[in-house]
Image: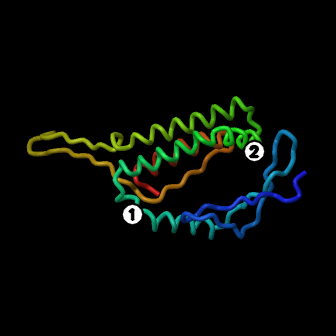
Amino acid sequence: MNTKLDPCPLFIGGEWIESKSASTPVFNPSIGEVIAECPVGRAADVNAAVEAAHAAFPAWMETPPVERARVLFKFKALLEEHFDELVRSNTREHGKTLVESRGDVKRGIEMVEFACGVPSLLTGEVLENIARGIDCESIRQPLGVCAGITPFNFPCMVPLWMYPVAIACGNT
């Protein structure tokens, strides 16, 4: 059994920080061994993350969609580079079989790939003369800070269904 557990830091404002909140054990479900301690998270942790995202929003919103897509292409490349490591971690922490974990990670990467197409996804629409003297125009704009609560049983796929698209669209 591990006597020294790896810390599970929080990533807030572009930095890894240690939470000051209480922690809960993370078990390897196949053997019951505690493999890490995960911070429970305090309101202060959430507030710090929201404040950092709020501060980053104006600049990210103004970043052209093509540049945001380039960031996601780099992220996709990192996911592919670390595919086997992510699969093993997924299996170790969640008890999925390797086949299930590969599918979970692969579907997540496919969603990042989808989000890389954001420049064409954000195209608005214009319909002239929808009624006499009235034109209709729709534009897509970022909303701001986004959050998601994801289920435990698809630890890679579901977050990657949510966050890459929101980020590609200019949200933080």
Looking at marks 2 and 1 on the same chain, the residue that comes earlier in the sequence is marked by 1
Quarter holding residue 157: top right
Quarter holding residue 29: top right
Q: Determine whether, in the image, residue 133 is placed left or right of residue 140.
A: left
From the image, tell me which residue sits under label 2: 93
Q: Position of residue 92 (x, y in %)?
A: 77, 42
Q: What's the distance in space between the residues labelled 2 and 1, CA to CA?
A: 36 Å
| Identity of the residue drawn at 75% across and 60% down | 7
Residue furthest out toward the left: 133
Q: Position of residue 126 (x, y in %)?
A: 20, 42
**Amino acid type, callout 1:** Ala
* Mark 1 Cα-neighbour bin, 10 Å: few <14, some 14–19, many ≥20: few
Q: Determine whether, in the image, residue 9 is placed left or right of residue 129.
A: right
| Identity of the residue drawn at 68% across and 35% down | 101
Residue furthest out toward the top: 99
| Identity of the residue drawn at 67% across and 42% down | 86
Q: Determine whether, in the image, residue 103 is placed left or right of residue 88.
A: left
| Front position in the image: 62 or 45 | 62
Residue furthest out toward the front: 81
Label annotation for residue 96:
none
For mark 1, give the secondary structure.
Answer: helix
From the image, tell me which residue sits under label 1: 59
Q: Position of residue 73 (x, y in %)?
A: 47, 44
* Mark 2 Cα-neighbour bin, 10 Å: few <14, some 14–19, many ≥20: some
**Amino acid type, callout 2:** Glu
Q: Determine whether, in the image, residue 120 is placed left or right of residue 41.
A: left
For mark 2, give the secondary structure.
Answer: helix
| Front position in the image: 140 or 118 | 118
Residue furthest out toward the right: 1
**As displayed, is residue 160 above or below residue 53?**
above
